Image: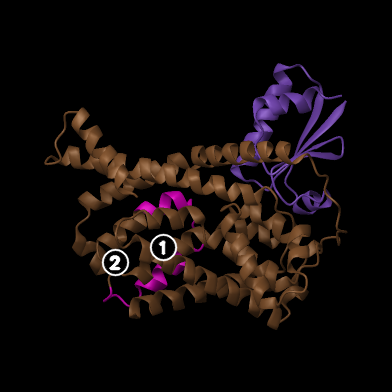
Amino acid sequence: MKEIRVLGTGCAKCKQLYAKIKQQAGELNIEANIIKDEDIASIMSFNVTNIPAIVLDGKVVSSGKLLSDKEINEILTKS
Amino acid sequence: MLGIFTKLADWSIDKLGLSLDTNLGKSIHFFIEDTTKIFILIYMLIFIISLFRAQLSPEKIKIYLSGKSRWYGYFLAVFLGVITPFCSCSSIPLFLGLIAARIPFGIAIAFLVSSPLISEIAAIMLFSMGTKGMFIASIYILTGVIISVTAGWLADKFTLERYLVYKPNIVEIENTKTDKRSEKIKVLIKYAHTFALDTLKSIAIYVVIGLMIGAFMHGYIPQEMFIKYLGRDNPFAVLMAAIVGIPLYASHAGVVPIIQVLLEKGVPIGTSLVALMSITAISLPEMIMLKKVFSVKLLLIFIVFLLLAFIVTGYLLNFI
């Protein structure tokens, strides 16, 4: 099962991104462990300075923007 | 240049069959002119800024700063603070990124202070306010720059870095991959457009609420009230504005229309700007987040410094 970690310190866009990913994963029936990570030390450990960021199985795949539905879809369906 | 929005509002009022002699006509005219003007200006501004922001990384800033003087660094940091997100929750990670990239602490602090303190959105909204707008926007930016640079300088002078609780790992400079240039520009423009549109969407509601509260205050609260409580003759007005605003938080986009009314009703510029800065610069959620990074002592120094800076700024501006 893939692990998707949404990094954000609680900004509006971070919350929106997390909600969008959760919703789409549900719609697409993708089993994933979706985590919202708000811990600043943890965020920094991924060397991310622009939030919100998405970490897919330990790798940063996007940072600094609220992705569109299509972009989220691509990340979710990427194996 | 801004006259086009007045013309648009004139035209709309005409089409709606309203007259500028009625209160309703006047309110709608004000609303159409201000919302279209603010939205279009903000879109353009954020679009241009996003082109820069997309390329921003602590590593690049470090390379850029190497060999330049410390003062140059403070001012560059403040500039970065202006063009980065106005929400402090997103500036803290970049602040830590700067420290991880071994950029001097004071420069990182100048960035941390200026990022929420000086908002490009607030500046452009103040600017669009009419004849005095340019002057007020300049004062707003200038005082913000002075406060941020002073904060950075003091942080270095008293080596406040030792009070940092969270020490980020030092990051090695990585080479970023380069795409084809034309491809890159296309992606960049798309990013800038999306970012500008997202920003507009997220602040639209605050602008509208702010404009509505502003319009209400404009029409229903008598001028004497403002003068009595926030006027030049009340020596505590600045103090009050600064202290009350510190824990409070509201979006720049929502506060500026209210500040605009305060200014029109005769509240002095110092008191008005202090209210704007204090409400938007630091808030309870930000303090909680900073608590994880700063020691209690540093957090207190940070808050007291801002409070004092606002009070001094307020009294100075009122005095001039």
Chain letter of disc 2? Answer: B
Q: Nearer the viewer, residue B154 or B20?
A: B20
Q: Are marks 1 and 2 on the same chain?
A: yes
Q: The residue tagged with tag 2: helix, strand or loop?
A: loop
Sequence order check, earlier mark of 1 and 2: 1
Task: Report the residue at 24% width, 67% height from top.
Answer: B227
The image position of residue B62, as x and y in percent, is: 77, 64
In the picture, measured across the screen, residue B176 lies left or right of residue B248, that is right
The tag on residue B137 is 1
Disc 1 residue type (three-letter): Ala
Q: Nearer the viewer, residue B111 or A3?
A: B111
- Colour of chain A, in one word, is purple
Which image quadrant for residue B92?
Answer: bottom right
Task: Report the residue at 43% width, 42% height from top.
Answer: B40
Whether residue B196 is in magenta: the answer is: no
Chain identifier of the brown chain: B
